[in-house]
Image (cartoon, helix red, strand yellow):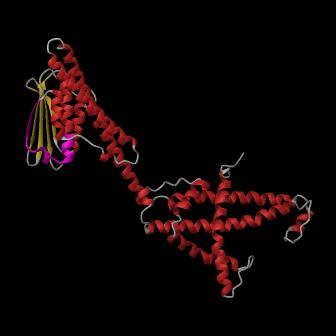
Amino acid sequence: MLSPLVRRATYLQWAFLVLGGALLMPYMMAGSLIGGVMGVSAASGDPIQPLVFLAVLPLVAATGLVLPVRVLEATAARSLLGAEIAPLPAEWASGRRSWSERRRTATWFTLHLGVGGVMAGLTLVIVPFVVVVILLPVTGTPFDLGVVEPLRAVWWGGPLLGVALLVALVYLIAGVGAVLARSAPKLLGPSPAQRLALLEERVRRQAVRNSLARELHDSLGHALSVVTIQAGASTRILDRDPVAVRAALGVIEETARAALEELDQVLRVLREQDHDPSTAPSRTLADLGDLVDATGAAAEVAGDLAAVPTVVSREMYRIAQESLTNALRHGSGPVRLALAVYDDHLELDVYNPAGRTPGRSGRGVGGMRERVTLLGGDFDAGPVGGEWHVSVRLPLRP
């Protein structure tokens, strides 16, 4: 059974470190070449080698600053280290890199190649040594390792030392790999400012999607109410007034078609993950005439609806739709709607003979009040003189 620190993933982490050592080799060769030109010996095994290693690390860091190595390093860290690195949005990844991102990438690139070079060197030294000392009891050695002769005195000393060194190397690799895996998201993932921006964007999109879902509820609820009322009326006058029945069926057809179109548009937006939901089409007061015609309400409109800002126009349309829907569901007579546009505000009044208490189904009065509150307006709904009255006042510049 594997230790929690040493798992199968340890060997992938080992490969990641050896890859770092392999990437470091061109820098070491360049450093050795420069040392040779300057008359400094830098052959393998010379004491000058650690100095060459330290001397080339600034060059590695400069490479990370200049070259776009982040994508390759992030891919390797995910695949071999198992690091959970959040991908950058496409527009950020393809855009101009900030100096903060360059510095973090250079730090990681230097860490990968530096630590990878050390661990790859230890692997090249320890693994052959382990093979030699494990086989020491049954074979000789053509070279003096310094510890061979003492180990010959005790036949089991060589295998024991070899196994201990190999286990120590594996645990060292696992520990280094775990540290790198925890460091990778900070150095290769989004910066704190970028993570905050991503979170804000996700919250904004979720809020817009919730708004679309609410509008879809209002729209479909209204359409179903109109269809139900018109179909019920048609069955009662089917034999007496074919013309009225034909008109009612036309209203049912238009209302159902409009609801299906809006449903299709909203669902298309919600399905497209990369699509900005705030760009979804939405009905405004420009569509109020169709809404009134479908419900058969008597409407009075005063003022220029085109001068109403889009946000206010959209929300007022939904409030009017919900008011008419409640009137159809819960009222018991003709509905009157009055809309007036003033210089700094917009007023809506809806009257219908009071029937059952409205607003008990779905969002109802609570949903309308929420919309008005968000826009800084005034809302009131309740019985007045035997009628149910909905009164809304919205500022044109909320």
Report whether residue 328 is seen. yes
* Residue 343 inside the magenta-drawn segment: no
Q: Position of residue 82 (x, y in %)?
A: 59, 53
127 shown above or below 36: above
- The answer to which image quadrant residue 250 occupies is top left
Of residues 275 and 122, the one nearer the viewer is 275
Q: Position of residue 371 (x, y in %)?
A: 23, 40
**Residue drawn at (88%, 58%) of the image:** 156
* Farthest bottom residue in view: 39
Report whether residue 357 is seen. no
- The answer to which image quadrant residue 320 occupies is top left
* Residue 306 inside the magenta-drawn segment: yes
**Residue drawn at (18%, 31%) of the image:** 323
**Residue drawn at (17%, 27%) of the image:** 295
Q: Quadrant of the N terminus?
A: top right
Of residues 239 and 180, the one nearer the viewer is 239
**Residue drawn at (74%, 76%) of the image:** 44
- The answer to which image quadrant residue 233 occupies is top left
Relative side of 256 to 274, left or right? left
Q: Which residues are magenta?
A: 298-316
Could you tell me how many numbered marks the image carries? 0
Q: Position of residue 171 (x, y in %)?
A: 69, 57
Relative side of 281 to 391, left or right? right
Relative side of 44 to 273, left or right? right
Q: Position of residue 139 (x, y in %)?
A: 92, 62
Relative side of 262 to 191, left or right? left
